[in-house]
Amino acid sequence: MKPQFNSYSDEARKRWGKTDAYKESERRTAGFSQNDWEELSGGMDEIMSGFARLNAEGISPGSEGARLQVGKLKSFISERLYTCTDEILAGLGEMYAADERFAQNIDRHGEGTALYVRDCIRAFVE
């Protein structure tokens, strides 16, 4: 089962269920074990911790280091869930900052991380 992802399943299906990315994600994760979900969660935590470190160091969202971190996020999603286009990535960045549930989860890595991730993604896709 999708541990922390379960609470978002119905909402995600309603919002994106007809999209190719959603269908691809459902297909690719259908056989995920508990360990697979834990690895996915751990990988996302590691990526968000990387953003938090960059933010704490005062690294500009448009810097090479920030661009590399966004590239890691985009690749991680594409390799494990669905093809993460720049358009999808931009939407994720906005959601991470605007949706309090995501912002709180991301900000546990460091205050302001969700807004920083959004800003890094904006710089990356522009």
Image (spheres, rainbow, N blue to C red):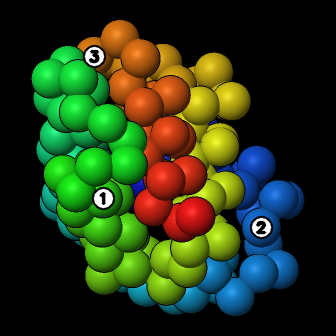
Report the residue marked by disc 1: 67
In the rendering, which numbered label is found on residue 110?
Answer: 3
Sort mark 1 into few (<14), some (14-19) or many (20+) by Cα contacts within 10 Å.
some
> Residue at 56% of width from left, 87% of height from top?
24
Looking at the image, is mark 1 or mark 2 earlier in the sequence? 2
| Amino acid of disc 1 | Arg
User: Is residue 109 found left or right of 53 in the rendered image?
Assistant: right
Q: Is residue 73 left or right of residue 14?
A: left
What's the CA distance linking mark 3 and mark 1?
19 Å
Quarter of the picture containing the N terminus is bottom left
| Camera-side residue of 69 and 15 | 69
Q: Residue 87: x and y, percent?
A: 65, 71
Figure quadrant of residue 34: bottom left
- Element under disc 2: helix
Q: Residue at x 30, y 67 (%)?
A: 71
Residue at (83, 80) in percent of width and height: 18
Element marked by disc 3: loop
What residue is rendered at 42% in x and 31% in y? 116
How many neighbours does mark 3 have within 10 angstroms: few (below 14), some (14-19), or many (20 or more)? some
